[in-house]
Each structure stands twice: as C-alpha cells, then as structure tokens.
Image (tube, grey):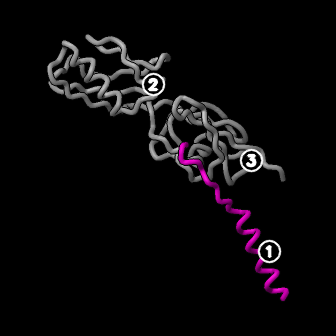
Amino acid sequence: MPLIILLAVVQMLVSCATPRIQVDTAFEAPYTLDAGDRLRVTVFGQEGLSNTYAVDAAGKIAMPLIGTVEARGRTTEELARAVAARLRQGYVREPHVAVEIETYRPFFVLGEVTAAGQYAYVSSMTVETAVAIAGGFSPRATKCCAQISRVVNGEVVRATVPMNYPVRPGDTINVPERWL
C-alpha cells in the first residue's frame, strides 16, 4: 500500500513540474502587418513601383502613383490584393503584385529577466529563446510559462503559454515572478 501512495505522490509532482497549458485558438490567428514591418513589394513588369516600403505609425505604406495603402491588420496576401486593386484603377492594366516581409517589427520582454526591453525578431523564435535573448531568467522568475500579449483582430489578447510556444513580431512577453 505505501508503494502505491508513493507512486501517486511522484505522479502528482511530475505533473506539477510540467504544466499542460491550453492556449485559445483565437490566439493563433494568421500574422498581420503593423507599424515597424518593412515590406518588399514587387509589381511584376513595373520596376519603378517595386521597392521596399516601411509600414508607418499610421499602419500604411506610401507607394508611387497610388499613394498610401492601409497595411495594418492585413496579411501579406491581403495587402498584395489591395495594391493590385489600386493599381488596376487606371495605372496598370493587369498588375501582378507580391508582398514579402523583409524585416519584422520588434518584440518586447518584460518581467523577471536579466535585461527587459525591445529586441529584433528572429524567425522561429520561442518564448524560451526570447528569454535567452533578454539575458535569461532572473533568480525570482517562473521558468515554466510566461504571458504573451498579442494583437488579434485589432484587440490586445493575453494568454499564458509554455516556454516552447512560438513568439511573433510585436508580441510582448512577460515573465512572472514565482511565489516560492
């Protein structure tokens, strides 16, 4: 009988050490553009229009002929369609437009890390690698999970995520203080 109790206690401790965190699927919406992203817009056959454009603080890019185009909240495919639609209005007969992200906007790390701040986004980043970029955990940090704040459909959404959760450009990661 004591062996069964010991095994039950060990199982409880192991399950506490690796929490299973469920993240709402709304948090997984496709990546959308925002201020700080640098884009490579290619209009095939129109070298004068193909260039690198920065998404400004108002969430727009400014292109020759068509002026400003709303980029905030759009995916790269949606922006390509919007640019093509504007070019089709008397400038280019059949525009073929491609939009690629050249440089992502930064992400932020707050809380119990050595050097909280703003950092350049690196592809395929997780919360754990973001914490490493910020100098690692402070002695009081919770090391199993963190909170991420992310803009989804125009609203800031917060979720508690495991350390292997993917980070996106513009995310704010907060590493909480542990209690014990």
Q: Which mark is residue 101?
A: none
Q: Secondary structure at mark 1?
A: helix
Of residues 75 and 101, the one nearer the viewer is 75
Q: Earlier in the sequence, mark 3 or mark 2?
A: 2
Q: Earlier in the sequence, mark 1 or mark 3?
A: 1
Q: Are discs 1 and 3 less than 8 Å apart at CB?
A: no
- Look at label 2 and name its amino acid: Arg
Q: Position of residue 125 (x, y in %)?
A: 51, 45
Q: Which mark is residue 141?
A: 3
Q: Are discs 1 and 2 less than 8 Å apart at CB?
A: no
Of residues 115 and 128, the one nearer the viewer is 128
| Residue 135 visible here | no
Q: Which residue is mark 1?
A: 9
Distance between mark 1 and mark 2 Cα atoms: 51 Å
**Crowdedness of circle 2 by 10 Å Cα count: few (<14), some, many (20+)?**
many
* Residue ID at (73%, 73%): 11
Main secondary structure type of the part rendered in magenta: helix
The residue stretch that appears in magenta: 1-27
Where is residue 104, by image quadrant?
top left
* Residue ID at (54%, 43%): 26
Q: Taking 8 as reference, is 50 above or below it?
A: above
Of residues 13 and 153, the one nearer the viewer is 153
Q: Position of residue 143 (x, y in %)?
A: 70, 52
Distance between mark 1 and mark 3 Cα atoms: 25 Å
Q: Which mark is residue 72?
A: 2
